[in-house]
Image (cartoon, helix red, strand yellow):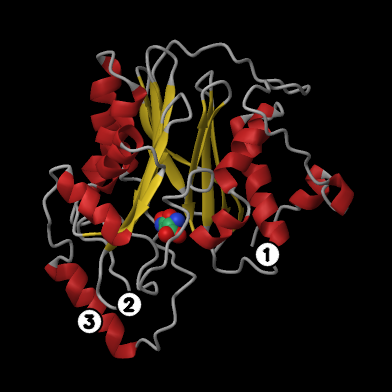
Amino acid sequence: MIRRNFLKLLGLTGSGSLLSLTTSCQNSPTTENTTSTTTATKPIVISTWKHGMEANTSAWEILKTGGTALDAVEQGVRVVESDPKNTSVGIGGTPDRDGNVTLDACIMDHEFNCGAVACLKEIEHPISVARLVMEKTPHVMLVGKGAQEFALEQGFKRKNLLTEASKEAWLKWKETSNYTTPINIENHDTISMLAIDHNGNMAGACTTSGMGYKMHGRVGDSPIIGASLYVDNEIGGACATGVGEMVIRVVGSHLVVELMRQGHSPQKACEMAVQRIMKCHKSVDDMQVGFLAMNKKGETGGFSIYNGFNYARTSDEQHELIDTTFDREW
Ligand code: SD4
């Protein structure tokens, strides 16, 4: 087991030495590792896990022809929402313990506009509903029945998202389950994506069916702006995957962006946010969280509690899957 002592490394052993975070939207990086806010001229997209390769391909089609980062992230993650083989996103997503597939998603653009849906049933593309919440309502988040009603009003069609395979797996789970929510899910594969377009604008998206066999009504970090996703076009963006409750407790993606604002590289910011999670939980045994970050220069980083997390990075120079570094091995 590889265990790096980040507390020592970061000098975070005393409560008084906790990171002081700046919160103003106007603040630019100030410390010695200052990251330039120079606008990236080259489009780039990153997204979580192996399925990010396919999602990035779709996002890249938009970016390379001059489209916006917002369109790119929406279209990119829709690919995974429509893949019935992916058991954590959209159709084919693992249901809650009562057999309902409930979806969470959020989206954010380069001007702090954001939209989200939570606990949405029978709609294949929650990310597109989230975008319409952002664009067509004065609100940020709609949940449950209200979110579904809004989606139907906007022309989305009801669809059964429980596939034969996911139903079978759920029925099998029910045979042995003692109805406690599993917290050590290893097959996290929510998709979170960040992109920069040819204008240097950044956007992000996150979509998931959440924790498998969760309590009905449980909502994780994925639809929560600041937790699963945050974009500050002056600084950069961050996104998350893993056990949502742990991400929410530290408002993880916002934390990563604020760390970049302080001058830390995307890689370092992700490491420090994971370290923060490890510091404020008594135990993180068997619980995975991973962050991705990208700054305005298009520099990227990723870090997770456990090994096994990876992300897809696509630009005009590359289309590759990158293993993140991590704190410990399973
Ligand atoms: C959740 N964060 O619902 C999501 C799950 C996830 O990869 O990311 N899975 O807590």
Q: Residue 281 carries which label?
A: 1
Q: Which mark is residue 18?
A: none
Q: Of callouts 2 and 3, which one flags the residue occurring earlier in the amino acid sequence?
A: 2
Task: Please state which amino acid type lies under the numbered disc 2.
Answer: Arg
Q: Position of residue 48 (x, y in %)?
A: 41, 43
Q: How many marks?
A: 3
Relative depth, front residue between 130 and 231 = 130
Task: Please state which amino acid type lies under the numbered disc 1.
Answer: His
Q: Residue 171 carries which label?
A: 3
Q: Is residue 116 left or right of residue 160?
A: right
Relative depth, front residue between 128 and 327 = 128
Q: In which quarter of the image is residue 160?
A: bottom left
State the residue at coordinates (30%, 45%). 51
Q: Where is residue 330 in the image (x, y as percent from the top left)?
A: 54, 64
Label 3 CB, ligand 1: below 8 Å? no
Q: In this view, does 275 lie above or below 164?
A: above
- Which label lies toward us, 2 or 1? 2
Q: Residue 97 carries which label?
A: 2
Q: Is residue 183 above or below residue 78?
A: below
Task: Please state which amino acid type lies under the numbered disc 3.
Answer: Leu
Relative depth, front residue between 141 and 302 = 141
Q: Where is residue 234 in the image (x, y as percent from the top left)?
A: 56, 20
Distance Cα–Cα, label 2 vs label 1? 26 Å
Helix, strand or loop status at disc 2? loop
Q: Of callouts 2 and 1, which one flags the residue occurring earlier in the amino acid sequence?
A: 2
Relative depth, front residue between 248 and 42 = 248
